[in-house]
Image (tube, rainbow, N blue to C red):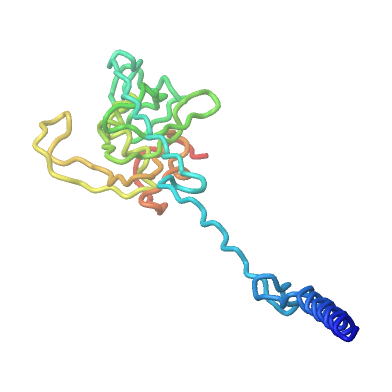
Amino acid sequence: MYYRTAHAAAAVIGIAALALTGCATGAEPEATAESAPPSADATPTASPEPEPETTDEPVGPTETPAAEPTETAPAETDAAACEQIAGQNNDAYGSYGDGDSLGGFPIVPLQDTGARPGAQGDAAADDEGVPASYTVAAGDNEDAIAERFCATRDYLVLLNSIRRNTSTVETDIPWPQAGSRITMMDLYEGDTLNLNPYTISSVGDQNGQAYANNPDIPMPPQQ
């Protein structure tokens, strides 16, 4: 009788011990660093932005090179294009401008026969299409300009004898073409030459300056 009671008590104690052991085993496992939730104070780490791709091609607008100026070949001028040569004594003396003269030469309307080497500047004409003034270009010379406008160099000098200065040089060209001395003008790029016998006192300049000479020569009324 005692043996059975003791055995039963031992069995009850064993079952209770197993129950307690199961309770201890079923407890929540401790949190580890890997499974722990992130702290509210943790600062998120920003992912680096991808670097832009670089190429050898230029970025932004590119300048378009300016077009090269086109040179215009000077016009071929036939001497026959001039109806008359201003500055030459001829039978037409007194038939232009009601007998007016310029330095003893008859007044002859000039003509523009076209640009050529030594006379590449721009010409301006009056309302009737007669050349009135000329802008000197780089490399111009008096002989070529006079030839372009159907005039002699002397006539061109007379047309500009008030607002421009002149210089006299020795020459070996025989008379009557020139004589021992000739009168010349110093030309500067951008100068304005007068081509109208009636505007000698009001049109023309030399190197940016207009003079007021008083030439003692026969001259038509000035405008």
Task: Please provide percent x and percent y for residue 17.
Answer: 81, 81
In the drawing, does residue 147 fall left or right of residue 12? left
Residue 101 lies, in percent from the top left, at 39, 31
Task: Compare residues 216 and 157 and report the one nearer the observer.
Answer: 157
Foreground of the two, 133 or 8: 8
The picture quadrant where one finds residue 70 is top left
Q: 27 or 88, which is in the foreground?
A: 27
Residue furthest to the front? 1
Q: Residue furthest top?
A: 80
Query: How many marks can you see?
Result: 0
Is 93 rendered above or below residue 47?
A: above
The location of residue 82, given as percent across then percent down, is 33, 17
Q: What percent of the width, then of the height, locates residue 67?
A: 41, 35
Relative to the observer, which residue lies in front, 222 or 128?
128
**Would you place residue 131 above or below residue 13 in this image?**
above
Q: Residue at x 43, y 26 (%)?
A: 99
Name the residue at 33% across, 24% down.
150
The image quadrant where one finds the N terminus is bottom right
Residue at the image point whose x is 44% and y is 28% from the top: 131
Snapshot quadrant of residue 172: top left
Name the side, left or right, on which 44 lies relative to 145.
right
Q: Quadrant of residue 28?
A: bottom right
